[in-house]
């Protein structure tokens, strides 16, 4: 605690003017913590004054999460959903990146596939999910394929724009130095596409989280979406909020402990001194 106080004091002394200090305060991590605390406080007060089983308080919801984690199926259901998210994410990223790179580099491929890309971008996710279940059955392959197919068009569009923005001068330099195709791809193309891959992965993960729940609700006997549907039928709002809270906690953990560190690692070369 003393070390933290000294660090804050030193930072304040470095900043100097009150305006600079105010800007530093608003950039601090404590701002996010305060916003969460305010939300929980408002939730607690609303539940206290409502006194309704349709609006349980945060303490009751947290107790449910702990009880279901220790003696129920919450951890299992979260694991099933996480497996589907992971599988659909990698399938969508691999297929979408390859097609997007080809469409961005080869105009003939872009002309052939562009109408189908527009169709997939505007086709409702619910239609794809229902058709996948009707044609391929209520199984894991249909569920994961339906989720991936809803995300692939977005990956294609993002990577295609990145492939179109590649610097031709760098490619000519790589050819002049007679780099192998793999070396040219790894050292010239991939670094330029990294921001587009990061954007596609970030938006893709957020979209897949949502679609997986719909897939589980419509045709799977397990997962968070299935549990939400089951507790909706029972009007068990505490369970609905409990599974939602656990789901959000997993999303935030993946974002802050996996996605952001990987993004910083992949862009570390930008911060190296020249």
Image: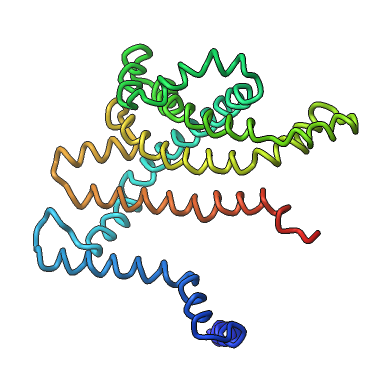
Image coordinates of residue 202 in percent, x first then y, are 50, 43
Residue at 30% x, 47% y is 72
Q: Is residue 58 visible?
A: yes
- Seen in the picture, residue 236 relative to 61 is either above or below; the reply is above
Q: Residue furthest right?
A: 177
In screen coordinates, is 256 left or right of 195? Answer: left
Image coordinates of residue 273 in percent, x first then y, are 78, 61
Q: Nearer the viewer, residue 156 or 33?
A: 156
Image coordinates of residue 255 in percent, x first then y, are 49, 51
Residue at 35% x, 23% y is 123
- Seen in the picture, residue 6 relative to 151 is either above or below; the reply is below
Q: Quadrant of residue 52?
A: bottom left
Residue at 75% x, 35% y is 186
Image coordinates of residue 127 in percent, x first then y, are 31, 21
In screen coordinates, is 264 left or right of 167? Answer: left
Q: Is residue 3 visible?
A: no
Colour logic: rainbow
The number of numbered badges drawn on the structure is 0
Residue at 30% x, 37% y is 225
In screen coordinates, is 78 left or right of 237? Answer: right
Q: Quadrant of residue 149?
A: top left
Q: Quadrant of the C terminus?
A: bottom right
Q: Quadrant of residue 215?
A: top left
Q: Nearer the viewer, residue 265 or 53?
A: 265
């Amino acid at each position: 605690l003393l070390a933290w106080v000294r660090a804050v004091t030193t930072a304040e002394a470095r900043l100097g003017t009150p305006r600079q200090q105010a800007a530093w305060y608003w950039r601090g991590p404590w701002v996010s913590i305060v916003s969460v605390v305010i939300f929980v406080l408002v939730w607690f007060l609303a539940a206290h004054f409502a006194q309704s089983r349709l609006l349980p308080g945060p303490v009751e919801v947290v107790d449910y999460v702990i009880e279901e984690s220790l003696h129920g199926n919450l951890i299992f259901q979260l694991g099933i959903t996480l497996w589907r998210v992971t599988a659909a994410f990698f399938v969508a990223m691999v297929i979408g990146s390859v097609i997007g790179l080809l469409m961005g580099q080869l105009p003939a491929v872009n002309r052939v596939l562009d109408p189908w890309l527009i169709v997939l971008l505007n086709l409702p996710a619910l239609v794809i999910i229902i058709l996948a279940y009707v044609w391929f059955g209520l199984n894991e392959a249909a569920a994961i394929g339906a989720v991936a197919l809803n995300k692939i068009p977005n990956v294609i569009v993002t990577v295609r724009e990145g492939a179109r923005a590649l610097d031709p001068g760098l490619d000519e330099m790589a050819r002049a130095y007679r780099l192998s195709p793999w070396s040219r791809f790894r050292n010239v193309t991939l670094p330029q596409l990294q921001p587009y891959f990061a954007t596609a992965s970030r938006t893709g993960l957020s979209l897949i989280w949502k679609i997986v729940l719909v897939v589980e609700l419509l045709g799977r006997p397990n997962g968070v979406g299935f549990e939400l549907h089951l507790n909706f039928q029972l009007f068990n709002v505490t369970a609905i909020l409990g599974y939602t809270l656990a789901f959000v906690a997993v999303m935030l953990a993946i974002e802050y402990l996996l996605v952001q560190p990987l993004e910083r690692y992949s862009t570390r070369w930008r911060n190296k001194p020249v």
